[in-house]
Structure formats: structure tokens, C-alpha cells
Image: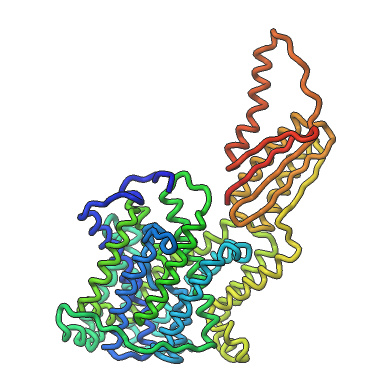
Amino acid sequence: MTGQQDHRGYSLDDRVPLPALLFNAVQHVAIIAPIGLVFPGLVARAAGLSPEATQAVVAASLIALGLGSLLLCRAGRLVGSGFLAPAVFTAAYLPASLAAAALGGLPLVIGMTIFAGLCELLFSFVLYRMRTLLPGEISGLAVLMIGITLALLGFRLVFDISATGQFVAGPDLSSHVALGLGTLALIIALNVWGRGPLRVFAVLIGVAVAYAAAAFAGRVEIAIIDAGMAGGLLRLPRLPLVLPAFDLSLAPPFMVGALAAALRAMGDITTCQRMNDRDWVRPDFISIQRGVRADGLATILSGCLGSVGLNTFSGSIGLAQASGVTARRIGPAIAGLFVLLAFFPPVIALAAAIPQPVTGAVLMFSSAFIIASGLQIIVARLLDARRILAIGLAFTFGVSHAAFLGFYTALPTWLATVSSSALVVALVIALSLNAIFRIGTSQTRTLTLPIDADLTSGIHAFCDDSGAAWGARRDVVERVFGASLEAGELALANGAPGTPFQLSLTFDEFFIDATASYELGQPPPVLDAEDDMYAETLVRMADLPMLLIHRQADRVAVATERGRSILRMRFDS
């Protein structure tokens, strides 16, 4: 990157001393592992795997995390984001993976995971062309639905509720719920009121304390731990050796999951770009494409090893920003630690035997931040009636999948492929409505008003309406309005009264172009020499609007053609 970081620490290309390298790598592994290994464990349980097979899946997952992080963090010409953006197992594939596990066991999970990785790999080549069909608010909706899916799954695990909503009250349920809520309360307390390491390692500490309490209460699956301990302290990892299977009915949910993973990777890599360059003004799409490509390859590798889909991890990116250590060289160290852990069966056994309510507490905790992130992405955009309807109706249908699951399971077979999960339903509805509502919405809008006292109010309404119709970011629309208002002031000062002032706005997902033009009026009268000070004041006042325009716009060009002043401005979004 050409710019410099704002914070102190180790920047993107810095060499990091070995002690700092290892310490930071351990920090990232510590926040990835407790959350990241939850999803493979859930899928292994849904597939009905034996303790030995579950350990094999966990070992494969650790190796997949290592290789995926290595791919994502490398700065390659074709593959790799070039930033400290390690991998984690994502909730985007979780509903589809659980369905595949129930339908065809681990072979189907592996086959569909490889298929999803191939889909994301394909998306990396067409994302730039698809940008108008994937506006920011739909990205936010995808993140929001992932968070809600996680939250509901965590709720079910904590309260021991079946997929059909059934649960059995009793003493055993009370201890089960107490363990889950106690874990959640401890993690929240450490995260909110903890300082330093207590806050950074809140999830790890919460899981460790809850694990010990569960073992004391006899709620840990001893068979899994015994199987891990029997293999000794150190041995070559045993991977699940099964042939992949494929089911066409599961293709849509895995494709939607791949799209959600690609959108999440885009957002994370954009965050990395902004974090590492204080002069950042717009996303570097070359870096984003390489990162999404690496994300897809990481998921393919994970499937080949016998685990589930991967994605970039926002939590690690946030930790890097908070610590000031964003050096990409931390990435290979994280990868090495994950692969090394796969050679220790006791560690694998402990991860595979995490009690269900503890897993649910971690999911509920992490879902809160994902939900908030999705909402922030949505509300950062100006939304008109069309976009409000697209997002609102898609969200309603998505939530209805969890509330009225029986309705969706009773749908005809030809609809089952696009109604397999809340995420799939929400994105299918949102993408369809967005495509329909684009009819009649021009990407170029023009305002023509006479140069008079009402000019500035007309500019304000025009910019607001245009931004809402396009779903542009609020802060960018405010800059467009500010610069356009100054262009109007120039027209009032220098234009011929009563002649038309024309403002044209053109929207792209990455920028807004504005062109203001007006007919020049008569030049001001020549002042006497004794009025030099007054003349200098007038010149400075005339320069002020242009100065403000340059501060608002990213690029400015001024020209005079056939007696009209033309001001061209570009705003990166």
C-alpha cells in the first residue's frame, strides 16, 4: 500500500521480531480456535460420526485453518489478499452443511464443500461485473442473516431445543441451561468489563472455565477424550478418508453460502486496506479479487481434507487493528501453529468434546457482533422505497423460515432448493426484488433549475433523492451535496441570473460523478486602484467555494465551453 498506518506497531510489510511474532500468532489462534472449531464439531455430530471419526474431522479442520490462513495472507500475483486476514470456519455454510450431514453424512458434506469453494472461485472472476446487482445493503443483509442463524442455533444448543422446537423440562435440562447461560455470562463479563488479556481472551477463558465446570458435573463426553489420550501426546494426524458425494438439491444453499462468503471476504479485505493506508479512498479491487480467490481455494482444500467451508475472520482483523500489529508475516506463523496443533491428539480430543451448551454460548456471543455488523452495513446506505421494500421483505421471509419451518418443508420439490435455509430465502428474495426494482431506475439523473434564490434548496432535495434511489453511502451523498451546493453558490455569484443551472449525477458502486454547468454572466466592473484591498477580499471570497469543493470531492476539473462554466467532480464511494 502506498499510504501509512495511523497507529503504532508493526505495519503491513514490517519484519516482526520472533518473540512478538509468536505472541501475536498465539493471540490469533486463541480467538479463532474456540469459535472456529465449533462448526466442524456440530457437523460431525449431525453426521453421527464416532469419537475417532470426530477427532479426524477436528484434525483435518486444524490443518485446513493453517493452509487457508496461509493462502489468504500471502501476497501473490494471482491468489492471496496480501493482508493479515486469517481463515475461520464460517456460519455461511453451516445450515447447508448440517442439512448435508443429515442427508448423506460426511461424504456429502465434503463434496458440497468442494462445490461451494469452486462457486466462490468463480465469483472472484465476476464480482466486478456483478457489483450493480450486489449493492451494499444486500451484503449487510447477508451478514445480518448469518448472525441471526448463529444466534438461533446457539439458543437451541443452550436450551436443548430440537430442530422442531421440542424440549423436555427436568433437572437435567436445568443443569444444561445453567452451564450454557453461565458460560455466556462469563464471556460477556470478561468482554465488557475485562481489561487487556482478559478482554482479548474472553472466549478462550470462558470456554476453559465452563469446560472445567462441565467435567466436574459429568457433562463432558469422556469417550472422545479417552480415544484422544490413547493415541499418545504426539502422532501424525488421522484424516477422514472418504470419497466426496454430490446432491443437486443442495447446490442452491451452498451457492448462496459461497456468495455470502465472497461478500464477507470483500468487506474484510476492504477493512484491511483502509486499516493499512491512511490515504485510502476506494477499494482496490485487484486485491479483493485475489483475496476472494484465495478464500474459495481455502474452502476447496478444507473440503478435500474432510472439513467444512472457510472464510476470512473479522475478529482477527479487529484484533490486528486494536493491537497495531498488521504485518502479513504474522499469517504464516498462525498457519504453522494450527498445523502443529493437529499433531497433538489430546488437544484435538478436548476440542471435539466441548459440551453442547458451551458451544451454544459461544455462538450466541459471536452472533451479537455479526448482527450489529450487518445492521451497520445496511444503515450506512441511503434507502428509497424500493430498497427498503427489497431489504424489509427479504428479511421478513428469511426470519419466517425459522419461525415457520413446517411451511417451508411442505413446499413443492421445485421450491425446496431455494428455501433450504433462512440465508438462502433472504438472499434469493433480496436479489430478485433488487433486479426487479432496478427497472426504471436510471444510473444518471439530471437537475435543471433557474439561477435564483431557490437553487440551493433544489440541489439539496435532488442529491438526497438520488442517493436514496441508488442506495449510496450516506457520507458520500453528504459530500456530493456539499460540493454541489458550492457549485450552486458559484453559479449565483458568477452566472447569468434566470439562466438554467444544470447538475448531472452518475452513480457506480465505486464512485459518483457530478457535473455542474451554468452560463457565465457579465464580468464584474473594474475597480479603482484605491480599492485594492476590497478587490483582494472579493477574490478570496470567490476562491472559497472552489476550496470547499476540492475538500469534498476526490477529483475536480474546471472548464469553460461556449460561454458556460463546467465543473466536473468525482466522489469515491
Query: Is residue 205 at all visible to an observer of this figure?
Result: no
Q: Farthest residue in the right direction?
A: 498
Q: Farthest residue in the top direction?
A: 530
Q: Is residue 164 above or below residue 446?
A: below
Query: Is residue 407 at all visible to an observer of this figure?
Result: yes
Q: Farthest residue in the left direction?
A: 232
Q: Position of residue 466 (x, y in %)?
A: 70, 53
Q: Quadrant of residue 107?
A: bottom left
Q: Residue at x 30, y 81 (%)?
A: 355
Q: Is residue 298 above or below residue 379?
A: below
Q: Position of residue 526 (x, y in %)?
A: 76, 15
Q: Is residue 340 above or below residue 96?
A: above
**536 or 515, which is in the foreground?**
515
Q: Residue at x 37, y 67 (%)?
A: 87
Q: Horizontal placement of 16 versus 103: left or right?
A: left
- What number of labels is visible? 0
Q: Position of residue 455 (x, y in %)?
A: 77, 39
Q: Residue at x 23, y 89 (%)?
A: 223
What colour scheme governs how the chains and residues are painted in the rendered image of this protein? rainbow
Q: Residue at x 63, y 23 (%)?
A: 540
**222 or 209, which is in the foreground?**
222
**129 or 479, which is in the foreground?**
129
**170 or 35, which is in the foreground?**
35
Q: Quadrant of residue 226?
A: bottom left
Q: Quadrant of residue 269?
A: bottom left
